[in-house]
Image (cartoon, grey):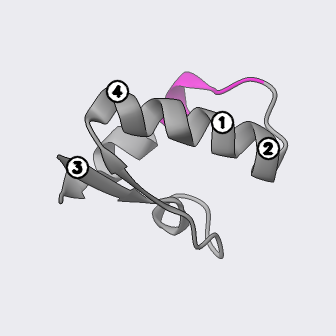
């Protein structure tokens, strides 16, 4: 189980996610589209998210 805080990548965002790495990436993709207006998730963002995940 891992955890990720969006604010670690996008300053000012308070959303947090927990789950497996794949679950978090799916949740973050939806969050990025709905709350940050990203229509495409860049590979470098995925790398940043993976790097900011911590054990939960």
Q: Which of marks 4 and 3 is nearer the N terminus?
A: 3
Disc 1 secondary structure class: helix
Residue 21 appearing in the image: yes
Distance in Å between CA atoms under marks 1 and 4: 13 Å
Quickly name the residue at label 4: 22
The answer to which of marks 1 and 4 sits earlier in the sequence is 4
Q: Where in the figure is residue 11, as x and y percent of width and height?
A: 61, 71
Q: Where is residue 43 in the image (x, y as percent from the top left)?
A: 53, 23
Residue 34, given in percent of the width and then of the height, sits at 79, 43
| Residue that label 1 marks | 30
| Residue that mark 3 sits on | 2
Q: Position of residue 13 (x, y in %)?
A: 64, 69
Q: Can residue 47 be seen in this view?
A: no
- 46 and 3: which is toward the camera: 3
Q: How crowded is mark 4: few (under 14 residues within 10 Å), some or many (20 or more)?
A: few
What distance separates the C-alpha of mark 2 from that of mark 1?
Answer: 6 Å
Residue 36 horizontal side relative to residue 56, left or right: right
Q: Earlier in the sequence, mark 3 or mark 1?
A: 3
What's the CA distance linking mark 3 and mark 1? 18 Å
Q: Does the stretch in magenta take in 31? A: no
SS class, disc 3:
strand
Total labels drawn: 4
Q: In this view, does 47 lie above or below 31?
A: above
Quickly name the residue at label 2: 34
* Segment colored magenta: 40-46
Marks 4/2 in contact by CB < 8 Å: the verdict is no
In this orientation, which residue lies closer to the viewer: 3 or 46? 3
Q: In which quarter of the image is the C terminus?
A: bottom left
Q: Tell me the element at label 4.
A: helix
State if disc 4 and disc 1 touch (CB < 8 Å): no
Image quarter for residue 19?
top left
Mark 1 residue crowding within 10 angstroms, few (<14) / some (14–19) / many (20+) = some
């Amino acid at each position: 189980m891992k955890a990720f805080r969006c604010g670690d990548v996008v300053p000012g965002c308070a959303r947090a996610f927990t789950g497996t790495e794949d679950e978090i990436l799916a949740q973050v993709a939806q969050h990025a589209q709905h709350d940050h207006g990203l229509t495409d998730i860049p590979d470098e963002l995925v790398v940043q998210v993976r790097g900011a995940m911590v054990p939960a």
